[in-house]
Amino acid sequence: MMLTMIAWIGMAVSVCYVPFRLKNLLGLRRRWPLAVLTAAVLGGYLLLLHTGIYVLDNIAIAWIYNALGLLFVFVIYLFFLLLITHPLTALLKRIPKRPLGLGGILVSAFLVALGFVNAQSFSVTRHDVAVKGLTQAVRIVHLPDLHLGAQRGEAYLHRILDAIDEQKPDMVLYNGDLVDSNIALKPELFSLFKRVRAEQYFTTGNHEYYLDTDRALRLIAGAGIRILRSEMVETRGIQLIGMEYMNADRETYDAHMVNTLTLKEELPRIARDGGKPSVLVHHSPVGTRYVADGHIDLMLAGHTHGGQLFPGTALVKYRFPMYRGRHQLDGLTLLVSQGAGTFGPWMRLGTRNELQVVQLIPAISNQ
């Protein structure tokens, strides 16, 4: 609720300031056409997200959603650039105003274009994790936040699956938000996963609950992907624990709450052998102290997108202190992926789409 309120207040300020500032800098006769256009972009995009219309199986809505997302970021960047340069025209009376206004527009457009181009590719990152009690190496491809839907379809999925084939993993873990729109819920799209020769597992993210959840899970299971909903399976010498999306505990705030489950309560209910290697897969990097107390060797998470684009990259750490990369908590190793796809604005600025390759290796005993 607080984040929604901040978004609408920010929209109101931008609608008032951007047209006013551009009118003064560019010498426009009227500012109300710009105000209407700005309000339509910002308000329309927030309404698409807030009402959940963007998940509908409708190609026109998908195009509008993507276009408004890019325009939304353009307006936000323009707002900040105009605000930052505002003191220049007040202090330096002779500074030319028109180039300042046009410069703000061009820089904002360049940043959006750069972010859009960056969002079309992905990088492969590698991590070696030594695990006690492991008798053989296990190669895992960790792939959260693919977000099949309005932005990711067959072409992008083919590229991801090609990269998976190149890594020759023992297992692939789709750690939540595999799909974020009903437009992607097509049997022909999910049949592509059948080409993967490794074991495949899936855990739910928050976005699987915003669309036709039952249909999405049927398609995932029908593609030969085993769904783990707060359960454990033993495979390749490890205890693989897949948790359904949930909050850390009942006291911690979660802006994406979809159920009343918590890691604090659910993890102890999963029977396992504390002396065997354990890998826990949960969409969000929360509840790490409960995971560490549960004698887990490795936790894999995503959800944060690393902030996806500036200024989110600077703000995400205040909500998720461990928002990307590798972290060590006592005997627990936490790996947080930036995600293989994007949500909201079809952009990456300051982050990359990521396919994470995790090599589990037997730990060498000192005894």
Image: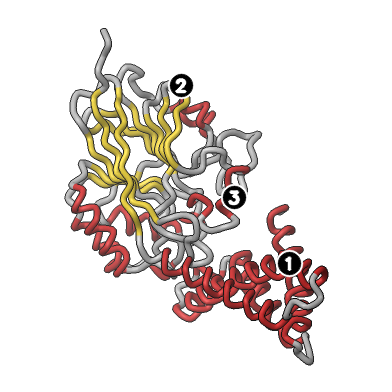
- Residue annotated with mark 2: 330
Residue displayed at 58% across by 48% down: 316
* Label 1 residue SS: helix
- Residue annotated with mark 3: 314
Location of residue 174 in the rendering, given as x and y in whole percent from the top left corner: 35, 49
Check disc 3: other Cα within 10 Å, few if <14, some if 14-19, many if 20+. Answer: few
Q: Is residue 22 above or below residue 300?
A: below
Location of residue 177 in the rendering, given as x and y in whole percent from the top left corner: 43, 54
Residue 173 visible? The answer is no
Q: How many angstroms separate mark 2 from mark 3 (CA)?
A: 27 Å
Name of the residue lying farthest toward the bottom? 29
Dot placed on the residue nearer the N-terminal end, 2 or 3 = 3
Instruction: Report the label total.
Output: 3
Q: Is residue 354 above or below residue 336?
A: below
Q: Quadrant of residue 367?
A: top left
Label drawn at residue 83:
1
Q: Is residue 212 above or below residue 18?
A: above
